[in-house]
Image (cartoon, rainbow, N blue to C red):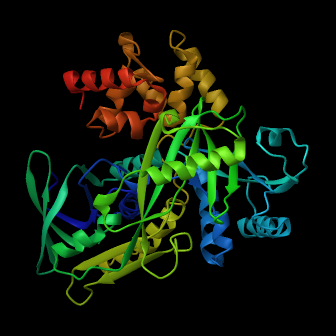
Amino acid sequence: MPRNTCDLLIVGAGINGAGIARDAALRGLDVVVCERGDIGGATSSASTKLIHGGLRYLEQGAFGLVRESLQERTILGRIAAHLVRPQRFVVPHTGERPVWVLAAGLAFYDLLAGPDSLPRSRRLPPDFPLLGALHAEVAGAHAYYDLWVDDARLTLCTLLDAQSLGARVCPRSELVAVAPDRAHWRCTVRGEEDEATIFARCVVNVAGPWTNGVEALRGAKARPVRLVQGTHIVVPRLHAGDDAWLLQQPDRRIVFVIPFADDFHLVGTTETELPSPDRLGVTAAERRYLLDAVQRAFGRVLAANDIHWEFSGMRPLIGGAGSARTASREYRLSMEGERDGRGWMSIQGGKLTTHRRLAEQAVDRLAAFLGNTVPCRTAERLLPGADVTPRAEFANGLVQRHPSLPSGWIAALIGRHGSTTQSLLDQLASAGPGRDFGGGLREAEARWCASHEWARSADDVLWRRTKCGVGMSPAQRAAFAQWWADQRPA
C-alpha cells in the first residue's frame, strides 16, 4: 500500500482513470490509483476495439463529439503506434439507408477529420472482389478507414506511463470508506493483504458502472446513469483478407465484423439496457442477434457452439430519454468542494477514443484547484513501447539479435509490447522462451506480465495482457491456469 498522503486518489483503473493518472502525474501531481479488480478489467477491455469518430453519431447530430473523436484518433495513432493499425471498413449498399445518405455522411466524416494520415472514403463498384464474400448481390459499397486498437493494452500502457512518472498504482485494492478530514479526504483502501488510510486532497470517482457505489461511501445521492451492455462474439474467419465490415441492420443499428487474430472475426455489438451492474452477462437473445447478422450478410449459419469467445461490457452513459442506440456518448465532469479545500470529482460517460481529452479537461480543473499551473502534454508524449517505427526494421533487428527464437513469436510480442519487447527478450538469457502454452503464449511472456504488468491471475494474461486465450483449446487454457496456480509467478 502507498504512503498515506497524495494530491489525487483516483478510484477506477479503466481507460478514463488511467488517462487522468497519466496526465496528472505528467504535471507533477502526487497520484494514487486504486482499482478493486484488474487493470482495465471491465468495460475498458470489452469494447469493439476501435479508435474512431463514431460514424453513426453523425446521424444523431453529435457533430462536436465526432469531431473531437477524430482529432483524438490522430493523436492516439501517433502516441500508441504499437497498439493501433489502420482498418478499412466496407459498408455494403443494402437498402437500410439511401446511398446518397451514406456518401454524404462519409464525406462529412472525412471533412471533420481534417488533415489525417488515413485514406479518405470512396465508393466501391458492384464488382469489387471483396463483395463476393457477401451472401447476396449488392449494388455497391462504400469504404472508409478508422483505427483498430488493443483496448486492454492501451489502458495498461497508459497506467504504466503514469507509474513511470511517479503515480502509485494499486490494482485489486478497493475504496471501502471515505470521510472529510479538514482539507483532505480520509480514504480507507483495502487490498488483498492489507488496508491503508490515505489522505487525499482530491478524490476522482471514475469507477464507471460502479460510480454510484463510490458516491454512496460519502453519503451522496445517486446520479442518473444508464447502463448499456455491449456484447461481442468471436467466430471462425468468415473470409480471407484484412477488411472489416459495417453492416446495417433492419432495426437501423449497425454491427461490425472485424478481423481478429489470424483465424477469427469479431462480431458486435449489441445495446441492451441493464438495471444494475450485477446483471452483466451475454444473453441468448444477443447471441442470436449477432449470429443472425452474420447469416444475413455472409450466408453462414453458425450456432452458439461455433463461438470461440464471447464477452460483454457495460457502457455507463449519461442518463436521459430515448433508446440505448441514440443515448449520448459524451461525458460529464462534476467538481465539488472548492470551498472546503478538498475536491471531489465525479465523471460520467465517455468512450475509449476520447479518454485523453476527457483526462485533459479533468486534470485542468483539478490542477487549478490544487494551484498547479503546468499545462497538459499528453498529446506529445509517446506511450511506453510506441517508438517502434519503422516496425519492420525494428522487428528485423530483434530477429537478428535473437536468431534462435521463432520470428513469428517475436512479431506477436511487438504487436503487444512494442519496443518494450527488446527488454522482455533481453531478460531471457539462456532460459529461452520457456514452455509453449499454445495460442502464441509462452512462459517468458506470462512471467513478464506478472512481474511488469500487474497480472495476478491466468485470466489477466489470457484475455487482457494478451488475447492468446482465443486461440487456445479449453484443455490448453486449463493447463495454463494450472501452471499459473502452481508457479504463482505473480
Which image quadrant for residue 34?
Answer: bottom left
Q: Position of residue 109 (x, y in %)?
A: 74, 66
Q: Position of residue 50 (x, y in %)?
A: 58, 52
Q: Quadrant of the C terminus?
A: top left
Note whether 420 is above or below 399 in the view shown: below
Above or below: residue 363 compared with residue 466: below
Q: Residue at x 60, y 58 (%)?
A: 75
- Give the x, y percent position of residue 321: 48, 82
Observer-nearest of 70 and 286: 286
Q: Position of residue 283 (x, y in %)?
A: 42, 52
Visible residue check, residue 462: yes
Q: How many marks?
A: 0
- Occupied quadrant, residue 84: top right
Residue lying furthest bottom in this view? 339
Viewer-closest of 329 and 404: 329
Locate residue 387: give its quadrant. top right
Determine the residue positioned at 8% across, 49% down.
194
Between 349 and 25, which is closer to the camera in this rendering? 349
| Residue 15 shows up from this direction | no
From the viewer's perspective, tell me whether residue 285 is left or right of residue 129.
Answer: left
214 to the left or right of 331: left
Which residue: 28% across, 27% down? 481
Query: Is 338 positioned to the left or the right of 300 in the image?
Result: left
